[in-house]
Image: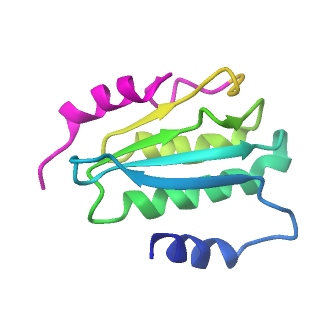
Amino acid sequence: MFFKKVLRIFSKKLPEEKVTVQCIVSELPNDNGVFILQFIGIYKRGSQGNIDADFIRDTIICKLESHLTRGLITDFKEMTYSWGNAILEPLSYMAGSEIPCVAIISSKCQNWPTEYIYTVDNITDAVDFIKPRISHR
C-alpha cells in the first residue's frame, strides 16, 4: 500500500530519466511506528540527481504523512552521494516534521549536508536518538 502511494505520486511526474536510487522499508521490531527507509544505489551528481531527490522526497513524505509513523530513520549508508543541492528538499522536510527523524550516512555520502538533520553512522545510534523523542499517540 505504501509504495503504491509513492508510485502514484511519483509516476505523475516521472521523466524519461531513470531513477538510480531504490528504497527498502522496514519497521523496528517491538517499536510500533518507528520506520526505517533504507535508500540504496547511486544519487546522480548535480542537476542529474534531481529525479533521485524527487523519489527520496516523495518516499519520505508518504511515510511521514502516515498516521502509523511515530519516528523515521532514513538510512543512506548504501547510497553513493557526492553532490547535488536537490537533496536539501527531502532533508528540510524531515527537519521540519513534528515526527522525530534521523539520517544514517557513511563514507559513501561524500559532501553530505549535515546541517539540515541530525546524522549518525549506525543503526544503534539512530535508535538511541529516536526512542526518547517518539510520542505515544
Say which quarter of the image contains residue 73. top left
Residue 130, compared with residue 17, is above or below; it is above
In the rendered image, residue 42, in percent from the top left (x then y), is placed at 77, 43
Q: Is residue 81 found left or right of 97 in the rendered image?
A: right
- Residue at image position (23%, 34%) is 131
> Is 5 covered by the magenta stretch?
no
The furthest residue to the left:
136
- Residue at image position (31%, 41%) is 100
Colour mode of the rendering: rainbow
> Is 120 covered by the magenta stretch?
yes
Say which quarter of the image contains residue 77. top right
The residues colored magenta run 112-137
Q: Which image quarter holds the C terminus?
A: bottom left
As rendered, which of 41 and 15 lies closer to the eye? 41
- Residue at image position (86%, 63%) is 17
Q: Is residue 105 found left or right of 41 in the rendered image?
A: left
In the rendered image, residue 136, in percent from the top left (x then y), is placed at 12, 50
In the rendered image, residue 128, in percent from the top left (x then y), is placed at 28, 26
Q: Which image quarter holds the N terminus?
A: bottom left
Q: Is residue 26 found left or right of 78 in the rendered image?
A: left
Residue 73, compared with residue 113, is above or below; it is below
In the rendered image, residue 33, in percent from the top left (x then y), is placed at 26, 54
Q: In this figure, what is the number of numbered marks?
A: 0
- Residue at image position (65%, 26%) is 112
